[in-house]
Amino acid sequence: MTTVDTATITVELPEAFDPRWNRLPGITVDGKQISLDPAKYFFRFEARSWLVIDWQTVVDGLLGVDETEEASVEQMALEFIKTHGRSTRDPGEVLAIAYQVYSYVFRDEHLAALGLPRVTAEHLRMLREAATFMALNKVELDGHISNVGPCWFFPSATGVVFDLSEEDGQMLDEVYHGGWFNEHRRIEGIKAHTALGGRLVHGCQSVPDQSGGVVAPYGASMARFREELAGMKKEWIEQVDSYRVTVD
């Protein structure tokens, strides 16, 4: 484990998180109050700075803008980040912005048209909570993976916290990084993720295989990212899985 700072991370969010997050080392959830002990929570914590944009700025300036023949949504997102992005060293602020991002991306109003009958409002709540923690993961421009927490390994972490089967954990992972299998929602996600300074990327192939999710800066080296992913995960996934509660 590598840590850059041992100061406790704290934030109060608009909604209470599931108390079962306390099963993972370093997380303390007390209703809306969340505390993280970096030394216990992160597998790797080398960079305590993140690029963010205030959520209201994204709502006002980007969510309602349509792409054109001259400017794709990815181009607009990159320019918006260049214009409005700022560096923060407060991980609590990152968590607060991430919760706003994922409250928008995984909102219940999409359920009626989702076409995935197994996905429920409860699953969307799980996604909002797990993706909020995921936002503290970090990839550098050169592709180096600098911050890794348990929610990098989405199926394992959600399985431990929410008592999901492996199949249900993988289903949740697919919804998380699959753009909800709909171009409209993919575009929503690209715009929303500008608040976290980049785009959502994952290392999975054709199926969820615990290869990670992170909001990476535009221009990050995917070649090095993929290379590091290949060698980093086995031991850490086993550690996450070890916290699963078994019921006789």
Image: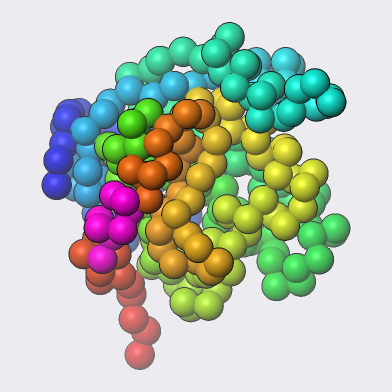
From the viewer's side, name the closer residue of 37 and 134: 134
From the viewer's side, name the closer residue of 241 and 146: 146
Q: Residue at x 76, y 71 (%)?
A: 117
Q: Residue at x 33, y 75 (%)?
A: 245
From the viewer's side, name the closer residue of 75 and 29: 75
The C terminus is located in which quarter? bottom left
Above or below, comparing residue 26 to residue 53 in the picture: below
**Image location of residue 59, percent across then percent down:** 71, 22
Q: Residue at x 70, y 44 (%)?
A: 186
**Image location of residue 73, percent across then percent down:** 72, 29
Left or right position of 81 against 187: left
Query: What is the magenta segment's predominant secondary structure?
Result: helix
Colouring chosen for the image of the structure: rainbow
**Residue 74 within the segment the image draws in magenta:** no
Q: In the rendered image, is residue 117 in sight? A: yes
Above or below, comparing residue 208 to residue 165 in the picture: above
Magenta residues, start to end: 227-234
Q: Count the marks: how many?
A: 0
**Residue 229 within the segment the image draws in magenta:** yes
Q: Residue at x 37, y 50 (%)?
A: 226
